[in-house]
Protein backbone atom coordinates (compact mmCIF):
# COMPACT_ATOMS: atom_id res chain seq x y z
CA UNK A 1 0.00 0.00 0.00
CA UNK A 2 1.15 3.48 -0.77
CA UNK A 3 0.84 6.19 1.77
CA UNK A 4 -0.45 9.67 1.04
CA UNK A 5 -0.95 12.68 3.22
CA UNK A 6 -4.53 13.36 4.25
CA UNK A 7 -3.64 16.98 4.90
CA UNK A 8 -3.72 16.76 8.70
CA UNK A 9 -0.29 15.31 9.35
CA UNK A 10 -1.44 11.71 9.08
CA UNK A 11 -0.92 9.53 6.10
CA UNK A 12 -3.86 7.75 4.50
CA UNK A 13 -3.20 4.25 3.17
CA UNK A 14 -4.21 3.85 -0.47
CA UNK A 15 -3.88 0.89 -2.78
CA UNK A 16 -1.12 0.74 -5.34
CA UNK A 17 -2.03 0.94 -8.99
CA UNK A 18 -2.02 -2.42 -10.73
CA UNK A 19 1.16 -3.08 -12.66
CA UNK A 20 2.42 -5.79 -14.95
CA UNK A 21 3.80 -7.92 -12.11
CA UNK A 22 0.54 -8.20 -10.16
CA UNK A 23 -2.16 -7.62 -12.79
CA UNK A 24 -3.66 -10.77 -14.31
CA UNK A 25 -4.01 -10.26 -18.04
CA UNK A 26 -7.34 -11.51 -19.39
CA UNK A 27 -7.13 -13.74 -22.49
CA UNK A 28 -8.75 -11.07 -24.68
CA UNK A 29 -5.98 -8.63 -23.73
CA UNK A 30 -3.27 -11.17 -24.55
CA UNK A 31 -4.87 -11.91 -27.91
CA UNK A 32 -5.23 -8.19 -28.64
CA UNK A 33 -1.51 -7.70 -28.06
CA UNK A 34 -0.72 -10.79 -30.13
CA UNK A 35 -3.02 -9.50 -32.90
CA UNK A 36 -0.99 -6.28 -33.06
CA UNK A 37 2.31 -8.20 -33.06
CA UNK A 38 1.17 -10.51 -35.86
CA UNK A 39 -0.01 -7.48 -37.83
CA UNK A 40 3.49 -6.01 -37.58
CA UNK A 41 5.07 -9.34 -38.51
CA UNK A 42 2.89 -9.49 -41.60
CA UNK A 43 4.53 -6.30 -42.88
CA UNK A 44 7.94 -7.96 -42.82
CA UNK A 45 6.61 -11.23 -44.24
CA UNK A 46 4.85 -9.44 -47.06
CA UNK A 47 8.11 -7.75 -48.02
CA UNK A 48 9.69 -11.22 -48.25
CA UNK A 49 6.73 -12.44 -50.32
CA UNK A 50 7.13 -9.45 -52.65
CA UNK A 51 10.86 -10.20 -52.95
CA UNK A 52 10.04 -13.79 -53.93
CA UNK A 53 7.47 -12.64 -56.52
CA UNK A 54 9.86 -10.06 -57.96
CA UNK A 55 12.56 -12.72 -58.23
CA UNK A 56 10.12 -14.95 -60.13
CA UNK A 57 9.42 -12.12 -62.56
CA UNK A 58 13.10 -11.32 -63.16
CA UNK A 59 14.25 -14.75 -64.25
CA UNK A 60 14.96 -18.31 -63.20
CA UNK A 61 18.40 -17.54 -61.74
CA UNK A 62 17.03 -14.89 -59.37
CA UNK A 63 14.05 -17.08 -58.50
CA UNK A 64 16.29 -20.06 -57.69
CA UNK A 65 18.54 -17.84 -55.58
CA UNK A 66 15.70 -16.39 -53.48
CA UNK A 67 13.95 -19.77 -53.26
CA UNK A 68 17.16 -21.28 -51.91
CA UNK A 69 16.93 -18.90 -48.93
CA UNK A 70 13.45 -20.17 -48.12
CA UNK A 71 14.58 -23.80 -48.47
CA UNK A 72 16.92 -23.48 -45.48
CA UNK A 73 15.83 -24.30 -41.93
CA UNK A 74 15.72 -20.60 -40.90
CA UNK A 75 13.84 -19.81 -44.11
CA UNK A 76 11.27 -22.50 -43.41
CA UNK A 77 10.87 -21.23 -39.84
CA UNK A 78 10.23 -17.74 -41.18
CA UNK A 79 7.66 -19.10 -43.65
CA UNK A 80 6.02 -21.15 -40.88
CA UNK A 81 5.87 -18.06 -38.66
CA UNK A 82 4.46 -15.99 -41.51
CA UNK A 83 1.79 -18.62 -42.15
CA UNK A 84 0.85 -18.69 -38.46
CA UNK A 85 0.81 -14.87 -38.20
CA UNK A 86 -1.43 -14.65 -41.27
CA UNK A 87 -3.89 -17.24 -39.96
CA UNK A 88 -3.88 -15.86 -36.41
CA UNK A 89 -4.39 -12.30 -37.59
CA UNK A 90 -7.25 -13.41 -39.86
CA UNK A 91 -9.00 -15.32 -37.06
CA UNK A 92 -8.53 -12.35 -34.72
CA UNK A 93 -10.13 -10.14 -37.36
CA UNK A 94 -13.08 -12.53 -37.62
CA UNK A 95 -13.43 -12.44 -33.83
CA UNK A 96 -13.54 -8.65 -33.95
CA UNK A 97 -16.01 -8.79 -36.83
CA UNK A 98 -18.29 -10.91 -34.64
CA UNK A 99 -18.04 -8.29 -31.91
CA UNK A 100 -18.80 -5.56 -34.46
CA UNK A 101 -22.16 -7.25 -35.03
CA UNK A 102 -22.97 -6.85 -31.33
CA UNK A 103 -22.57 -10.55 -30.54
CA UNK A 104 -20.14 -12.49 -28.37
CA UNK A 105 -19.86 -10.08 -25.44
CA UNK A 106 -20.50 -12.66 -22.71
CA UNK A 107 -17.31 -12.73 -20.61
CA UNK A 108 -17.03 -16.51 -20.77
CA UNK A 109 -17.52 -16.46 -24.55
CA UNK A 110 -14.91 -13.70 -24.92
CA UNK A 111 -12.35 -15.92 -23.15
CA UNK A 112 -13.36 -18.94 -25.23
CA UNK A 113 -13.07 -17.00 -28.48
CA UNK A 114 -9.70 -15.62 -27.41
CA UNK A 115 -8.19 -19.01 -26.61
CA UNK A 116 -9.99 -20.53 -29.60
CA UNK A 117 -8.28 -18.04 -31.89
CA UNK A 118 -4.88 -19.15 -30.63
CA UNK A 119 -5.62 -22.88 -30.74
CA UNK A 120 -7.30 -22.72 -34.16
CA UNK A 121 -4.48 -20.65 -35.67
CA UNK A 122 -1.90 -23.20 -34.53
CA UNK A 123 -4.02 -26.13 -35.75
CA UNK A 124 -4.74 -24.57 -39.16
CA UNK A 125 -1.08 -23.64 -39.63
CA UNK A 126 -0.01 -27.20 -38.85
CA UNK A 127 -2.64 -28.58 -41.24
CA UNK A 128 -1.41 -26.28 -44.01
CA UNK A 129 2.21 -27.27 -43.47
CA UNK A 130 1.40 -30.97 -43.20
CA UNK A 131 -0.58 -30.60 -46.44
CA UNK A 132 2.42 -29.16 -48.28
CA UNK A 133 4.85 -31.62 -46.71
CA UNK A 134 6.61 -29.03 -44.51
CA UNK A 135 8.01 -27.13 -47.44
CA UNK A 136 9.07 -30.01 -49.65
CA UNK A 137 12.66 -31.03 -50.21
Image (cartoon, rainbow, N blue to C red):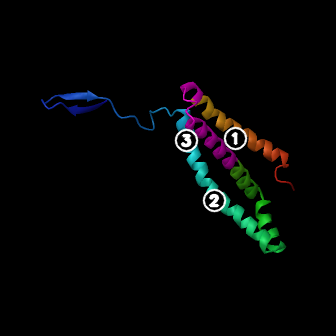
Q: Is residue 92 magenta?
A: yes
**Horizontal and vertical percent for residue 85?**
66, 48
Return the disc, 3 or 1, that comes first in the chain's sequence.
Answer: 3
**Which residue is drawn at the image coordinates 67% and 58% (left, top)?**
45
Q: CA distance from mark 3 to mark 2?
A: 19 Å
Task: List the single residue furthest toward the left.
Answer: 8
How many marks on residues?
A: 3
Q: Are marks 2 and 1 in contact (CB under 8 Å)?
A: no
Is 90 drawn above or below residue 98 in the view shown?
A: below
Q: Secondary structure at mark 1?
A: helix
Q: Within 10 angstroms of label 3, few (less than 14), some, or many (20 or more) residues?
A: some
What mark, if any, has residue 44 been given in the picture? 2
**Horizontal and vertical percent for residue 76?**
76, 55
Tell me: 133 left or right of 83: right
Q: Within 10 angstroms of label 2, few (less than 14), some, or many (20 or more) residues?
A: few
The N terminus: image quadrant: top left
* Quadrant in the rendering for residue 4: top left
Task: List the single residue furthest toward the right.
Answer: 137
Find the magenta span and give its range: 84-109
Q: Secondary structure at mark 3?
A: helix
Q: Secondary structure at mark 2?
A: helix
Q: Nearer the viewer, residue 9 or 119?
A: 119
Q: Which secondary structure is most common in the magenta stretch? A: helix
**Horizontal and vertical percent for residue 126?**
77, 42
Q: CA distance from mark 2 to mark 1?
A: 19 Å
Q: Is residue 20 magenta?
A: no
What mark, if any, has residue 121 been given in the picture? 1
Q: CA distance from mark 3 to mark 1?
A: 14 Å
The C terminus: image quadrant: bottom right
Tell me: 93 left or right of 61: left
**Which residue is drawn at the image coordinates 34% and 33% (left, top)?**
16
What mark, if any, has residue 32 been given in the picture? 3
Amino acid sequence: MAEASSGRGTRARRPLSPHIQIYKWPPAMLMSILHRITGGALYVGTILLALWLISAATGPENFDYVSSWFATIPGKLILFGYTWALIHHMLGGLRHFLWDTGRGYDLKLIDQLSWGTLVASIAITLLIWIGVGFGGA
